[in-house]
Amino acid sequence: MEVADASLDDDRTVKAALYASQGISDFWIVNLVDNCVEVYNRTDEGRYRLRKNYVSGDSVKLQDVTIRGIDVVDFLP
């Protein structure tokens, strides 16, 4: 998980590519610019295939894990 404001572009490109190439299945960015949580998953050939944005009021769950969702509002200022 990365927390991003000024680093948002690097987190979406450089860090996402690095994490995906290492087989990390889920990558989250707490996007302070747009007040959302970006969730990337389903790696394929060293890239994330899916991205979903969650906003205040949404609940985020880890891929393939059964746990209570985490409310997006808990991540944002």
Image: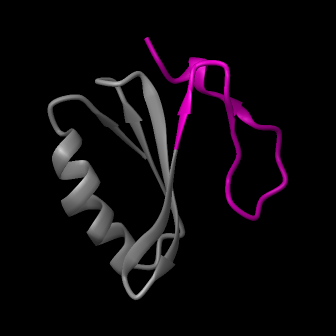
Tell me how the rendering is colored: one colour
Image coords of residue 70 (percent x, y): 69, 33
Residue furthest bottom in the image: 45
Front-most of residues 42 and 22: 42
In the rendered view of the protein, which quadrant contains the C terminus? top left
Question: Could you tell me what secondary structure mostly forms the magenta stretch?
Answer: loop
Q: Which residues are magenta?
A: 53-77
Residue 56 in magenta stretch: yes
Q: How many numbered markers are drawn?
A: 0
Q: Residue at x 18, y 46 (%)?
A: 9
Image coords of residue 36 (percent x, y): 46, 28
Residue 29 against residue 35 in the figure, above or below: below
Asked which quadrant contains residue 68, the reply is: top right
Residue 74 against residue 3 in the figure, above or below: above
- 20 lies left or right of 9: right
Residue 49 against residue 63 in the figure, above or below: below
Front-most of residues 22 and 56: 56
Residue furthest top in the image: 77
Image coords of residue 14 (percent x, y): 19, 62
Q: Residue at x 22, y 40 (%)?
A: 8
Q: Residue at x 25, y 50 (%)?
A: 11
Asked which quadrant contains residue 47, the reply is: bottom left
- 8 lies left or right of 39: left
- 37 lies left or right of 4: right
Image coords of residue 49 (percent x, y): 47, 71
Q: Residue at x 28, y 69 (%)?
A: 17
